[in-house]
Amino acid sequence: MADRDPLVIAGREYHSRLLVGTGKYRDMEQARTAIEASGAEIVTIALRRSNIGQDPDAPNLLDAVPPDRYTILPNTAGCYTAKDAVRTCRLARELLDGHNLVKLEVIGDEHTLYPDVRGTLEAAEQLVAEGFEVMAYTSDDPIIALRLQEIGCVAVMPLAAPIGSGLGIQNRYNLLEIVDRLDVPVVVDAGVGTASDVAVAMELGCDAVLLNTAIAGAQDPVLMASAMRKGAEAGREAYRAGRIPRKRYASASSPIEGTFFE
Amino acid sequence: MSTETSTIQVQVNGEGMALAAGATCADVLERLGVDQQQRLAVEVNEAIVPRSQLNEHRLADGDRVEVIQAIGGG
């Protein structure tokens, strides 16, 4: 499609509606190649204690995904409290020279990795007050999604299914409700398994999809990254094209009149 | 007032490190073999030390220093 259909987050335009993570790859080169094949312009990173002292030659992730080429989206993965999430975002801002865009996640427990929405709301308020542009990972609860928008998050990111589960979209009606009610971009984050899951999310009207494991954990991550890219593009075009209604009975594709047999 | 000692003991990324009294964050990075030009963020006692102040920020006995970098994540 030649006409413009940018994804706009915090006033910046993106052409790709796929956001990808950088975790779980075999090595930095595989991460770099797969991310390139995905066409993603926004990539997530995590922050951890530096081990540079132990291995001075270890390649730096930000050399594989340079900030002058990608929009870096630091996450707060591993944070179980609002305080830790806020602290992580401040470190990210320092690390990335004042960069304000962050992916907020406050996790509830290890088994589900479900968001602790109470901690998420608390952290979102604090971060917005400190000038961060917050993309908030959350459950598929439409009311919590609305609250995050009210707080001032620049995107709300409901899960499709638990992080890393690959189950695909489990509650499309909740996602539809969130898409209908929110004005800020809705990014499906977590739980995607394969390209059709991405396409379904986009067909529902979601603005973008964020995933990591579904690419990094595939047998051929680079090929899967390409498939995900196409899934996002196909789903978005189908959404914009407007699908036919579902009917219980057939309707012929060829004219009924003018047949030449009795 | 405690008597001044010639060394201080700090925690760097959770591990003990002995430094000369008056040592700065930059000294910690040097000890770690880390180039200040690398993309890092430094925290002392849970407060950010901006890159521009790494050379000036003096550490005190018992300070907890974190040196943070970007890694792969989703």
Image: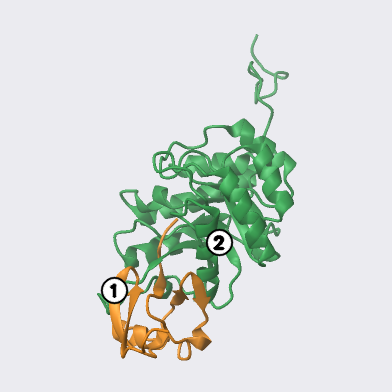
* Closer-to-camera residue (B21/A79): B21
Q: Does the rendering let one see residue A50? A: yes
Q: Residue B11 appears at what percent x and percent y?
A: 34, 73
Amino acid type of the residue tagged 2 in the rendering: Val
Picture disc at residue B16: 1
Residue at 46%, 40% in the rendered image: A162
Q: Chain A hue?
A: green
Q: Which one is in front in this view, the residue at disc 2 or the one at disc 1?
A: 1
Q: Residue A237 appears at what percent x and percent y?
A: 63, 47
| Residue A235: quadrant of the picture | top right
Q: Check disc 1: other Cα within 10 Å, few if <14, some if 14-19, many if 20+.
A: few
Residue at 42%, 83% in the rendered image: B59
Asked if residue A174 lies left or right of residue A89, the reply is: right
Give the residue at the far top of this rendering. Answer: A262
Picture disc at residue A231: none
Q: Which scheme is used to colour this image of the protein?
A: by chain
Q: Residue A134 appears at what percent x and percent y?
A: 62, 59
Amino acid type of the residue tagged 1 in the rendering: Gly
| Mark 2 → mark 1, Cα distance in angstroms | 26 Å
Chain (orange): B
The mark tally for this picture is 2
Quarter holding the N terminus of chain A is bottom right
* Closer-to-camera residue (A238/A18): A18
Picture disc at residue A86: 2
